[in-house]
Amino acid sequence: MSIVTIERRVLEKNDRVAERNRSLLLERGIFAINMVSSPGAGKTALLERTMERLEDRDRTAVIEGDVQTDLDARRVARYGVRVVQVVTRGGCHLDAPLVARALESLDLEGVRLLVIENVGNLVCPANYDLGETLKVVVLSTAEGDDKPLKYPEMFRSAAVLVVNKTDLLPYVDCDMAVLRRHALETNPSLRVFETSCRTGEGIEAWCDWLRTQSAAPA
Ligand code: MG
Ligand code: ZN
C-alpha cells in the first residue's frame, strides 16, 4: 500500500515539473519528441540518419539519456546540433526534473526541434511525462511482432511508431502486417513509419514528417 502511495507522489511531482517543461517549450514554439525503445532498437542510429538529412540542424537540440557513458551524445554531436547528455547512473528512465535541468543547460534560442532520446526501456518511460509534445516509440523488427501486446502502455502513450531495421525482415521472426495490426489494435491513432538505418529506406518519409511538425506554428 505505502509503495503505491509513494509511487503516486513521485508521479504527481514529475507531472508538475513536466507541465513546466511543456509551457517553456510551447512558449518558445519548440516541437519536442520523447524517443523511447528497448535497448538496441536503433534510436541513436535513427537520429544520426535524421540529422544527416535535416537542413535545420542549427535549430535542433538533443537531450541524450543513458544509464552510463556519453557515447551517444558524441555520435549525435558530430552533426553540429546542440546536445546535452544526461547520465542516469543506473536509473532506467528519464524524468521531468532531469529534463528540466538539461533544458536549463541548453541554449534554446532559435531551436524549433528538440529530440529527447530516453533510456532504452519499454516499461517505465511510458509513465513519465517529460513535457514533450509527443512520444515516438522505436521498435526493431528483430524484437518480433508481439511487442505491442507485451508492452501496451508504451504503445498507447505514443503518437508515433517507427519500425526500424526493416532490412532484417527476411531473417527475423517478424511479420510487418501482424506487427502493424497489433500496434493499431493497441492504439488506433498511432502513425507508423518503417525505416532502415542501413539502407536508408523510409528515412526520408520520417524526416518529412519531422520537418512538417517542427515548422508548424506552435
Ligand atoms: Mg542510444
Ligand atoms: Zn525506470
Image: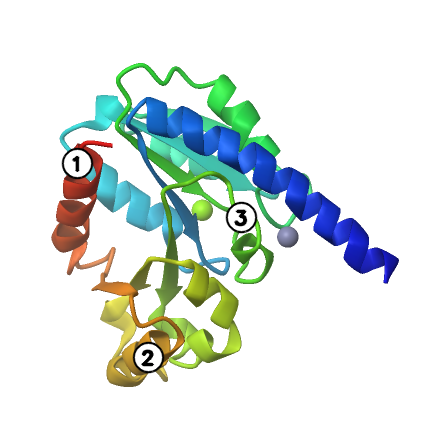
**159 is higher (above) or lower (below) than 13:** below
Eye-nearest disc, 2 or 1 = 1
Q: Position of residue 118 (x, y in %)?
A: 49, 46
Q: Give the quarter of the image for residue 2.
A: bottom right
Indicate the secondary structure of the residue bearing disc 2: helix
- Amino acid bearing label 1: Ala
Q: Is residue 95 visible?
A: no
Q: Position of residue 172 (x, y in %)?
A: 35, 80
Locate residue 52: give its quadrant.
top left
Q: Look at the image and tell me whether residue 15 can be seen.
A: yes
Vertical comparison of 27 with 90: above or below: above
Q: Amino acid at mark 3?
A: Val
Above-or-below relation of 73 to 39? above
Q: Quadrant of the C terminus?
A: top left
Q: Quadrant of residue 27?
A: top left
Q: CA distance from mark 1 to mark 3?
A: 28 Å
The residue depicted at 52 percent of the width and 46 percent of the height is 129
Q: Which residue is mark 1?
A: 216
Give 114 or 204, whichever is nearer the viewer: 114
- Residue, disc 2: 179
- The reply to whether callout 1 and callout 3 are in contact (CB within 8 Å) is no
- Residue drawn at x 54%, y 27% as measured from the top left: 100
Q: Is residue 15 left or right of residue 163?
A: right
Residue in the image at 40% along x and 78% along y: 144
Q: Is mark 3 within 8 Å of ligand 2?
A: yes
Q: Amino acid at mark 2?
A: Leu
Depth check, front residue: 40 or 119: 119
